[in-house]
Amino acid sequence: MLTEQAVTIAYYRKLFLPKGLMLMKKILSTILPSLVIFAFIWFDSLFPESKYILLGIYLLFPIIFIIQGIICPNSKKYMIIGFLLSSFAVIIPISVWYNMGSMITPVIIYLLLGIVSFFLSNKIRKISIS
């Protein structure tokens, strides 16, 4: 037989664990893409001869923004925070470490791709649910 304490612990785990996991998923899907972008730029800046930053600018970063739009939760607030963090992770390190000039135009294109993928994925989810 289960003791009263074991039943209470099981009840609280069932009550609070899913909320904690959902919060962790929201935080990871918001912050992780910007951390991946920043880590890629930082690692590439350690090697001055490396030209992988061009691969990142033209291929990797748009893919990350699209994936971020797809995996972002249904909340527009988390989408905006995630896109802001990812935009800062692109603009600030590239302008400081590479002296490349303005990255605003590519970031605007990345944001448009991410927003379109966010709304398309939400529309597909709503259609598949109903």
Image: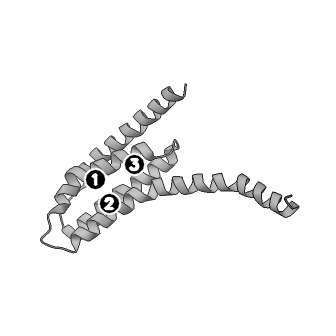
Image position of 90 (left or right of 99): right
Mark 1 touching mark 2, by CB under 8 A?
yes
Q: CA distance from mark 2 to mark 3?
A: 12 Å
Q: Which residue is mark 2?
A: 37
Q: Amino acid at mark 2?
A: Ile
Q: CA distance from mark 1 to mark 3?
A: 10 Å
Q: Which residue is mark 1?
A: 61
Image position of 69 (left or right of 75): left
Indicate the colouring scheme: one colour
Which secondary structure, mark 1?
A: helix
The N terminus - image quarter: bottom right
Q: Amino acid at mark 1?
A: Phe
47 or 21, nearer to the observer: 21
Instruction: From the top left corner, tell me how far across and down residue 35 is, in percent.
Output: 38, 63
Q: Which residue is mark 3?
A: 68
Task: Bin the neighbour count of mark 3 within 10 Å (Cα to Cα): few under 14, some 14-19, many 20 and up.
Answer: many
Instruction: From the top left corner, tell me how far across and down residue 105 is, in percent.
Output: 24, 49
Task: Bin the neighbour count of mark 2 within 10 Å (Cα to Cα): few under 14, some 14-19, many 20 and up.
Answer: many
Q: Which of the 4 image quadrants contains residue 7?
A: bottom right
For the point 19% across and 68% down, the residue is 98
For the point 18% across and 56% down, the residue is 55
Q: CA distance from mark 1 to mark 2?
A: 7 Å
19 or 42, nearer to the observer: 19
Mark 1 touching mark 3, by CB under 8 A?
no
Q: Which of the 4 image quadrants contains residue 2?
A: bottom right
Q: Which of the 4 image quadrants contains residue 10?
A: bottom right
For the point 37% across and 56% down, the residue is 86
Label 2 vs 3, first from the N-terminus: 2
Instruction: From the top left corner, tell me how far across and down residue 30 is, in percent.
Output: 46, 54
53 or 18, nearer to the observer: 18
Q: Amino acid at mark 3?
A: Gln
